[in-house]
């Protein structure tokens, strides 16, 4: 079962939430981990995709969008991306580390080793985060909280 970490940001800014996600993604990449960024919408996935190209000068993180179209391509077409971003269940090799920017718990929790939840200080994000926190606790998962 996965270890779950909640990162609580003091700001209500979605942009700061996304930038913090980029920093976690970069850290995972530099540590040699493949990870999946779970989002609520194609628009949110696009924001993260674009931000990973621009959030830090000189930074390069191989990443790509994981959609129904890319899922149907041969695995070799999208597996060169260490970081995948999408709205659906993470593909097999990317299930170990999930950065959850969505309002739902990831699917197939038994396959995931680590879930990172990033919450800004907006009521909408905090309410959805509290619900997921309770779900994780009810499942008996180890949950830690980090105030940033």
Image (tube, rainbow, N blue to C red):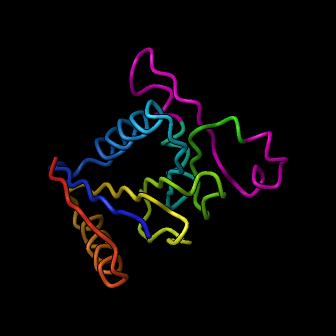
Name which residue lies at 59% across and 36% down.
63
Of the pair 146 and 118, the residue shown nearer to us: 146
Outermost residue to the bottom: 138
Residue 50, compared with residue 123, is above or below; it is above
Is 9 on the left or on the right of 71, as rendered?
Answer: left
> What percent of the width, then of the height, locates residue 95?
56, 57
Q: Is-magenta flag for residue 64? A: yes
> What percent of the width, then of the height, locates residue 50?
52, 34
Name which residue lies at 37% across and 43% down.
21
Of the pair 4 and 126, the residue shown nearer to us: 4
Residue 29, compared with residue 13, is above or below; it is above
Name which residue lies at 18% across and 48% down.
11
> What percent of the width, then of the height, locates residue 17?
31, 47
Span highlighted in magenta in the image: 50-78
Quadrant in the rendering for residue 103:
bottom left
Of the pair 1 and 26, the residue shown nearer to us: 1
> What percent of the width, then of the height, locates residue 33?
50, 41
Residue 18, compared with residue 136, is above or below; it is above
């Amino acid at each position: 079962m996965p270890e779950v970490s909640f990162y609580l940001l003091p700001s209500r800014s979605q942009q700061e939430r996304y930038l913090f996600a980029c920093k976690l993604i970069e850290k995972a990449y530099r540590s040699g981990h493949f990870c999946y960024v779970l989002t609520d919408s194609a628009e949110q996935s696009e924001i993260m995709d674009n931000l990973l190209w621009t959030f830090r000068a000189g930074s390069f993180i191989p990443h790509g969008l994981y959609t129904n179209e890319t899922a149907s391509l041969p695995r070799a077409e999208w597996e060169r991306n260490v970081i995948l971003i999408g709205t659906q269940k993470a593909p097999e090799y990317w299930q170990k580390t999930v950065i959850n920017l969505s309002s739902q718990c990831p699917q197939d929790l038994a396959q995931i080793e680590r879930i990172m939840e990033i919450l800004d200080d907006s009521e909408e994000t905090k309410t959805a985060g509290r619900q997921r926190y309770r779900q994780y606790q009810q499942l008996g998962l180890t949950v830690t909280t980090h105030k940033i």
